Image: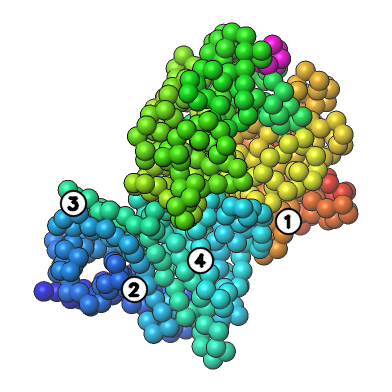
């Protein structure tokens, strides 16, 4: 019985470093990658150039309170020299555990997959993963005052009824125990520990999220003479249930975690690297979405809300077709129903809930007319249930419960428990009425995250993550592979695991009327996901851009510039028939030849340590992109988010821009002259600048 196998590599190239996740000339401080599994503990470390050991020193695992350190593991044959496979049998639980360790020989990275298979039906109450404490520690390389931690939970709270933007994104770790990853915001499934200068970084990325989600628990040593963490571990939780039933027919993957050490990597690039590691497991929708080179119109924002009807929307669709050829999806938001926005008015017959005063021929005829105009029809849907409605009152056994056994509620609204077969069948009848090749092939799924991801919900069987996969697949089955699928509230933080089904996600709060304050509030949520290439996973949606007549041209352009430079899918909004010519001209510029999904590089480092509103953003276009083929290498945006005049800009080096580059203003194509050391401009209150960088041949 082998109890220890060590893997060392003193001839590594370099750890991931520098701008845009690329290697560069920066000094490499980490040497001698060491991976060892011994006595039920896994060590993944490297040597710092000052002699310190860095990394995870002695990770252990538990299942139902039983520790891997009390088990005897056997080495099993592995397919490659860089893979170790270990197996043990928990006699009291009657289950086999297999731990597969895959070493990346070119990087300081290890992926650990953990499988459990019981001999008979087995209830799992707790699974901990990656356990470290103050005895066997996360080995750090600097003082506690210099350590910095990044997770999307730092930027936003989405845990009903609490919802708000918080900051900064990059923080000193807390002395108090803090959990990361628990909430309804579709957080990025990773955590990043670095130092104030960003010289060294430790990443953990969860590569699997169904049936269990990785929740980190972290606590910094509070004693002044100790360094590092008193607690660093993760639990794999069946969100939406108190337990998980292991099937007996095959091994179940209960965790898949990548442990990676990096150098000179900003939090933005660490998030991008982690998201890429997750998304490449799937045929990610962002790679094939029609929104990469197109855009959509949505009926909700800029003063419309539920005030819609057949004739008004058809007139607007014709305006779109005549003026904005890149807009190919027309998304009808809330307001087509006879009743309120909740699911219950569709009960018992889904067809009865269509407002025939607004849509005399029904919404299927409306969808057909949109196709005749040349637009793909999409429709908004929310699965919430009014708990006082006949649906809820007559079908109490259909309602999703909370951890106290009562109907889960957000105010007076709750959800169906789709693990209950009759509830599931009826919900499918609503989806059948709305979606299909002869109906709507675009879906905006709203008010849905809490149904699957709140730690308060309890499904009668399965869990929220399992049923989320089922529900999303039901929608994708109906809209088809070419259909457009976007998630909405709770506003997402870019979880790439959803790229298996979804083209995009609404990342900010509703822009509503497009006022300055709504724009600023919406933009605050976006920072962590800007660096992620949506065309490799799923695309962010900063919500609609349009025209607010009560705001200045500068404010309307600020909004449009933000939606453009963030790199996500483009969503047009508002009563187009009332827009002045300057509004239509502005929108035409933004919607001309869309080439979306490229990462937005935030040059303004202060955004990560302070207010998360970037002042300098760049999109770098690869040579094979359609934008580069049109002679454009970059777009650069400068923002003033305040009511005071500010100097905004950055150096040529930081912008990755040549001093003699040919620049033109995005809005009027007029030449733009840079400063001798970079791009710097005195921007007035609420002003922005959007620049196009042309190739030398243009």
Q: Label 3 vs label 4: CA separation?
A: 32 Å
Q: From what the image shows, is residue 11 above or below residue 481?
A: below
Residue sitting farthest toward the front:
394
Taking depth in this image into account, of 500 and 219 the one nearest to the observer is 219
Q: Which residues are magenta?
A: 309-317
- SS under mark 3: loop
Q: Earlier in the sequence, mark 2 or mark 1?
A: 2
Provide residue 129's location: percent of width, then percent of height.
35, 66
Q: From what the image shows, is residue 270 above or below residue 44?
A: above
Q: Earlier in the sequence, mark 1 or mark 4?
A: 4
Q: Label 2 vs label 1: CA separation?
A: 43 Å
Provide residue 328's location: percent of width, then percent of height.
58, 21
Residue 315 in magenta stretch: yes
Taking depth in this image into account, of 422 and 502 the one nearest to the observer is 422
Residue 504 in magenta stretch: no
Q: Is 462 positioned to the left or the right of 404 in the image?
A: left
Nearest-to-viewer mark from 1 and 4: 4
User: What residue is shown at x 77% (from left), y 37% (from top)?
Assistant: 514
Q: Earlier in the sequence, mark 2 or mark 3?
A: 2
Answer yes or no: is residue 568 visible: no
Identify the residue under disc 2: 59
Provide residue 263's location: percent of width, then percent of height.
49, 67
Q: Label 2 vs label 3: CA separation?
A: 27 Å
Identify the residue under disc 3: 248
User: What residue is shown at x 34% (from left), y 46% (from top)?
Assistant: 461
Provide residue 33's location: percent of width, then percent of height.
35, 72
Nearest-to-viewer mark from 2 and 1: 2
Q: Which numbered disc covers residue 179?
A: 4
Q: Label 1 vs label 4: CA separation?
A: 36 Å
């Amino acid at each position: 019985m082998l109890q220890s196998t060590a893997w060392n590599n003193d001839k590594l190239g370099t750890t991931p470093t520098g701008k845009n996740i690329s290697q560069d000339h920066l000094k490499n401080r980490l040497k001698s990658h060491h991976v060892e599994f011994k006595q039920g503990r896994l060590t993944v470390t490297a040597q710092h150039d000052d002699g310190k050991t860095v990394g995870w020193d002695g990770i252990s695992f538990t299942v139902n309170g039983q520790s891997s350190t009390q088990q005897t593991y056997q080495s099993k044959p592995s397919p490659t020299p860089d893979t170790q496979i270990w197996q043990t049998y928990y006699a009291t639980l009657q289950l086999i555990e297999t731990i597969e360790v895959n070493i990346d020989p070119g990087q300081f990275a290890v992926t650990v997959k953990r499988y459990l298979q019981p001999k008979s039906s087995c209830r799992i109450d707790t699974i901990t993963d990656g356990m470290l404490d103050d005895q066997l520690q996360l080995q750090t390389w600097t003082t506690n005052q210099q350590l910095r931690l990044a997770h999307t939970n730092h930027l936003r709270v989405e845990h009903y009824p609490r919802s708000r933007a918080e900051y900064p994104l990059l923080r000193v770790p807390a002395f108090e125990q803090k959990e990361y990853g628990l909430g309804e915001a579709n957080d990025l499934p990773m955590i990043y520990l670095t130092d104030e200068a960003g010289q060294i970084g430790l990443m953990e990325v969860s590569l699997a999220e169904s049936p269990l989600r990785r929740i980190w628990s972290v606590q910094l040593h509070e004693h002044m003479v100790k360094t590092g963490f008193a607690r660093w571990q993760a639990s794999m939780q069946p969100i939406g249930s108190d337990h998980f039933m292991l099937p007996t027919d095959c091994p179940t993957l209960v965790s898949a975690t990548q442990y990676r050490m990096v150098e000179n990597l900003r939090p933005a690039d660490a998030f991008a690297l982690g998201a890429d590691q997750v998304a490449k497991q799937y045929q990610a929708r962002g790679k094939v979405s029609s929104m990469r080179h197109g855009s959509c119109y949505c009926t909700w924002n800029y003063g419309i809300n539920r005030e819609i009807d057949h004739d008004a929307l058809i007139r607007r669709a014709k305006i779109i077709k005549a003026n904005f050829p890149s807009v190919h999806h027309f998304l009808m938001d809330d307001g087509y129903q006879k009743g309120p926005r909740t699911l219950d008015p569709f009960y018992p017959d889904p067809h009865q809930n269509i407002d025939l005063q607004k849509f005399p021929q029904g919404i299927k005829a409306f969808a057909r007319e949109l196709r005749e105009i040349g637009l793909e029809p999409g429709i908004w849907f929310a699965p919430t249930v009014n708990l006082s409605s006949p649906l809820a009152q007559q079908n109490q056994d259909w309602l999703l419960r909370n951890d106290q056994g009562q109907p889960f509620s957000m105010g007076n609204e709750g959800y169906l428990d789709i693990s209950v077969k009759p509830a599931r069948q009826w919900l499918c009848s609503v989806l059948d009425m709305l979606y299909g090749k002869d109906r709507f092939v675009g879906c905006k799924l709203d008010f849905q995250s809490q149904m699957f991801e709140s730690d308060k919900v309890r499904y009668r069987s399965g869990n929220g993550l399992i049923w989320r996969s089922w529900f999303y697949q039901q929608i994708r089955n109906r809209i088809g592979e070419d259909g457009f699928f976007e998630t909405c509230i709770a506003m997402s933080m870019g979880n790439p695991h959803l790229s298996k089904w979804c083209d995009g996600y609404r990342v900010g709060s509703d822009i509503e009327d497009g006022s300055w304050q709504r724009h600023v509030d919406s933009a605050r949520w976006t920072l962590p996901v800007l660096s992620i290439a949506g065309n490799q996973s799923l695309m962010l949606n900063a919500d609609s851009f349009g025209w607010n007549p009560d705001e200045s041209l500068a404010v309307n352009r600020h909004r449009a510039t933000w939606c453009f430079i963030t790199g996500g899918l483009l969503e047009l909004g508002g009563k187009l028939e009332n827009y002045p010519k300057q509004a239509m001209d502005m929108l035409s510029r933004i919607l001309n030849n869309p080439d979306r999904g490229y990462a937005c590089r935030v040059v303004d480092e202060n955004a990560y340590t302070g207010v998360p509103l970037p002042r300098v953003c760049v999109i770098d276009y690869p040579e094979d992109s359609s934008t580069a083929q049109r002679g454009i290498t970059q777009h650069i945006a400068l923002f003033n988010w305040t009511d005071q005049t500010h100097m905004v800009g950055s150096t040529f080096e930081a912008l990755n821009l040549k001093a003699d580059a040919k620049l033109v203003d995005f809005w009027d194509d007029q030449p733009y002259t840079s400063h001798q050391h970079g791009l710097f401009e005195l921007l007035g209150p609420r002003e922005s600048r959007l620049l196009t960088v042309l190739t030398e041949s243009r």
